[in-house]
Image (cartoon, rainbow, N blue to C red):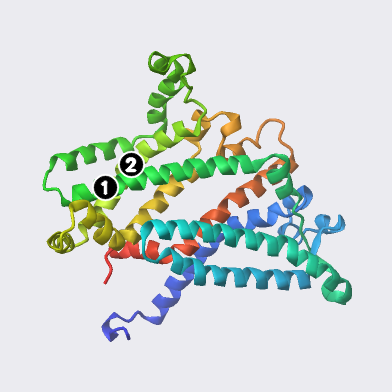
Amino acid sequence: MSTPKALQQPLTLKLASNAFLIFWLLLAVFPLFWILAMSFKSPVDAFSSSALDVVIGPETLSRGNGLSALDIIFGVVVLWVSARLAMRWLMPMAAGDGLIQRVFSWLVACLGFGLLFVAVFFFLLPWVLGPLNDIAGPLGRPVLGLTTEHYNAVWVENEFWRNFSNSLIVTAGVVTISLTVGTLAGYGLARSGSNLAFWILVIALVFRALPPTVLVAGYLPAFVNSAEILRPWLGENAPTLYGQPLAVIAVLASINQPFTIWMLRSFFQNIPTDLDEAARVDGCTHFQAFRWVIMPVMWPGVITTGLFSFLLAYNDFLVTSLLLDQSNQTMVPAIAGYFNRETTTTDQVEAVAAAVSITAPLFLLVMVFQRQIVSGLTAGAVKG
């Protein structure tokens, strides 16, 4: 569909706006690219004053760790094919029918796809390229320094996988509670004619705007003394909630819930009430109308709201560092733990490798759900 002549931008304005967008895109992508390059280099190369040394890695190459031109070509091809398959298979699966079946099948598919990618990229591809590099001549000589020793140190030696699993537990709990309560409360507020609940929600949003430090300070004594508080009811076996992921889930969900309810309420208000009335005429109860008629239409809004809840729990530092002990720590505070008075350059590169590792699920999440996120943000979760 062509743009009307009156709305067409001058060429100079198009060039200026595109150049501005490209500049800010490069500014946003640069730190991600830089820490990715640092995470695969030896400490000497990673913290070199020469940008070319950080990218090429001469010290890493001299240690016998590098990629040939053939390795780079095949690696890029595998990454491109993997991205295309993920968009072709995982994205339609996330937009299918049936909420519970869709989420479960998507999680299973993502897990299988991730395991397959790791097996192909990190095990099968090096096994195949080894003999090829020996007979490829100049194409088989290392030209780019690269080592995965820092990732091995982080995930195997330092057992970063425990922090990753703790983050998944906290994130899954926060998202589940936030969306379950938020969808029910948001639907009720959107279809209620009462102003009392609306003003209660406004007051809750005011408290949501407070610094998290203030809210955590109020929760902390209750969790620290939870054993004494629960002992009259549970006896000597009363548990201590401090240091447990359940405490963090409760705090993050309560902090995030007003925003979640408010956001979902806005999405529900954009859905015509005619859908509810038609479902009621066909014999549905209020909950059946909500479950079978409204929720399928609300899917982009739920995805968008769930993404905000996911980011809150996944990236949280303050609450998790205060309420979790060292054995149950999540990823973000664990990465901060790499930096102390005795930190070496090797520790710093390992921290960079850990930081790169935690961004991978975020990229996968946004890539798979990009259509639902854009639809939820721009169309108010209304289809057609």
Give the amino acid type for the residue marked by disc 1 in the picture: Leu
Left or right: 322 as drawn, with respect to 204: right
| Image quadrant occupied by the C terminus | bottom left
Density class for disc 1 (Cα within 10 Å; few <14, some 14-19, many ≥20) is some
In the image, which disc is placed on residue 126?
A: none
Identify the residue at image location x=73%, y=41%.
157
Give the amino acid type for the residue marked by disc 2 in the picture: Gln
Most foreground residue, 336 or 239: 239
Q: Quadrant of residue 98?
A: bottom left
| Marks 2/1: CA–CA distance | 12 Å
Most foreground residue, 84 or 332: 84
Density class for disc 2 (Cα within 10 Å; few <14, some 14-19, many ≥20) is many
- SS class of the residue under badge 2? helix
The image shows residue 203 at horizontal and vertical percentages of 23, 37
Left or right: 145 as drawn, with respect to 212: right
Identify the residue at image location x=69%, y=63%.
121
| Image quadrant occupied by the N terminus | bottom left
Q: Is residue 361 above or below residue 163?
A: below
In the image, which disc is placed on residue 257?
A: 2
Identify the residue at image location x=43%, y=63%.
94
The image shows residue 274 at horizontal and vertical percentages of 14, 63
The image shows residue 242 at horizontal and vertical percentages of 49, 25
Of the image marks 2 and 1, the number of the one nearer the N terminus: 1
Disc 1 target residue: 184
Can residue 304 be seen in this snapshot? Answer: yes
